[in-house]
Each structure stands twice: as structure tokens, then as C-alpha cells.
Amino acid sequence: MQPERSTNALYHFPLSPFSRKVRLSLAEKKIEVQLIEEKYWEKDPDFLRRNPAGKVPVLRIGSRTYSESSAICEYLEDTYPDPPLLPRDAETRYEARRLVSWFDDKFHSEVTSKLMGERVFRKVMGTGYPDSANVKSGARAIKYHIDYMAWLLDQRRWLAGDTMTLADFAAAAHLSCLDYISDVDWNRSDAVKDWYAKIKSRPAFRSILADQIPGFLPPAHYADLDF
């Protein structure tokens, strides 16, 4: 039985890819939550009590709280198995988990943290001006990652195999954040563009496409399902 809506909340930041991954999983599984924006870098004592690591997202279901985005997604998979976001067979399940780690670790380190970190988070956190070397590094690295995705999609319908998985949500979470600031060259790969158009058209994506960050307006194509 699904918990009452009023007892569920997700503490998040709109342009956090880790928050977006969890939001996509919740929406796909039709679990309603109240979205509470958290400026986690301000280290609010109430928020630190929910997650001493001081990171978003934090999910509250009833009287329990859960942190770390991949652990949250695995918990949701265990407790709300339909629709499944991790494959049943061990090999494809492994591949989905490997790719989640790829995007949340390697892609985040080489791309998201460099582009989002410098272009957006320095301003919203008040930590100075963008480091051009980091921006250039992220702009170079994203080309490699898009090419890798294109290679995967040349062999598969979705990133991890023939069905959509958490791997697709992890990738889309990062790319959607970067697309908000026009840092994705969708002309580099038709396969990747078509994949993103498919996943972007899902009802689970609606609230993400409605995000607005003060001081940063998304490009016109950001919420266009036929971009």
C-alpha cells in the first residue's frame, strides 16, 4: 500500500543530477512526494540532521528518511518493484548498475562538475567566478561521453539493453541539467538525440522540464519534446 502523500517528501535541488535521478524514479513508479528545495551548501542544521553528509537528495517516506541517490533508487526498486527499473537477469542488471556508476562518478567528475559547477553553482553558492580551464575541460570531455553513449546505442535500444533502466535515468539526469545551460551538442549524435527525445517525452520528465532557476533561463528547446 502506498504511503499517504503528506508523509512523503524529497529534499532536492533542481539542478542536482542526483536529485533528478531519484525524481525520475519516483515519478516513473507513480510515488507522489512533496518537493522541498534545499540549498544544501548552506548546511542548515535541520537538513544536516536528515543527512549528516550534507548532500541532496534526501527522501522521506512516512517517518523514515533515506539518503544517497543510488541507495534510494535501489530501495525504491525493492519496495515498489513495478515498473521495474533494474532488469531481472543478473548480466543486464549488472550493466545497468555499471552505467549508473559511470554517469554518477566518471561523467559527473569529468563533465557535470566542470560545466554545471563552474557556470551555475559558483554563482548560486557565491564562490566566485568560473574557472575557464574547468569549463574547457568539461566541454572536451562531454564529446567523449556522447560518443560512448552513441556506441552503446548502436548495439542496444536503451543504454543498458533492450529495456529502459535506471542507467537511462542516471544519464538523462546529468544531460538534462547540462541541457538547461545549453552545454549539450545534440547534433553530435542522432542516436543520442533520439534516445533523449524518447526519455524526455515520458510523463516522469514533466516536472523536471518545468524547473526554473532564478538568474538562469533555459534555452527554448529545453522543454520542447520535438527538439
Image (cartoon, rainbow, N blue to C red):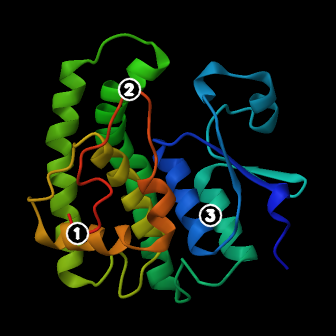
Is residue 213 visible in the rendered image? The answer is yes
Task: Give percent across and percent down for residue 215.
Answer: 38, 26
Residue located at (42% from left, 48% from top): 105
Q: Quick one: label 1 or label 2, which is nearer the N terminus?
A: 2
Alpha-carbon neighbours of circle 3 within 10 Å: few (<14), some, or many (≥20)?
Answer: many
Amino acid at circle 2: Gly
- The answer to whether residue 42 is left or right of residue 48 is left
Q: Secondary structure at mark 3?
A: helix
Q: Nearer the viewer, mark 2 or mark 3?
A: 2
Residue that label 2 marks: 215
What residue would you read off at disc 1? 226
Q: Residue placed at 45% from the left, 57% from the top? A: 101
Which amino acid, by three-letter code, is at mark 1?
Asp
Q: CA distance from mark 1 to mark 2?
A: 26 Å
Q: Nearer the viewer, residue 115 or 147?
A: 115
Give the crowd class for mark 1: few <14, some 14-19, many >=20 residues within 10 Å. Answer: few
Dot placed on the residue nearer the N-terminal end, 2 or 3: 3
Which quarter of the figure is the N terminus placed in?
bottom right
**Between 222 and 144, which is closer to the camera in this rendering?**
222
Q: Name the residue at the right extreme.
A: 63
Q: Rate crowding at label 2 as few (under 14), some (14 to 19) or many (20 or more) other CA atoms within 10 Å.
A: few
In the rendered image, residue 177, in percent from the top left (x then y), is placed at 37, 46
Q: Is 146 in front, or is 22?
A: 22
Element type at marker 1?
loop
In this figure, which residue is indicated by the disc labeled 3?
73
At a point 76% along the width and 29% down the height, the residue shown is 48
The amino acid pointed to by label 3 is Cys
Circles 3, 1 touching at the beta carbon (< 8 Å)? no
Residue 61 seen anywhere in this rendered image of the structure: no
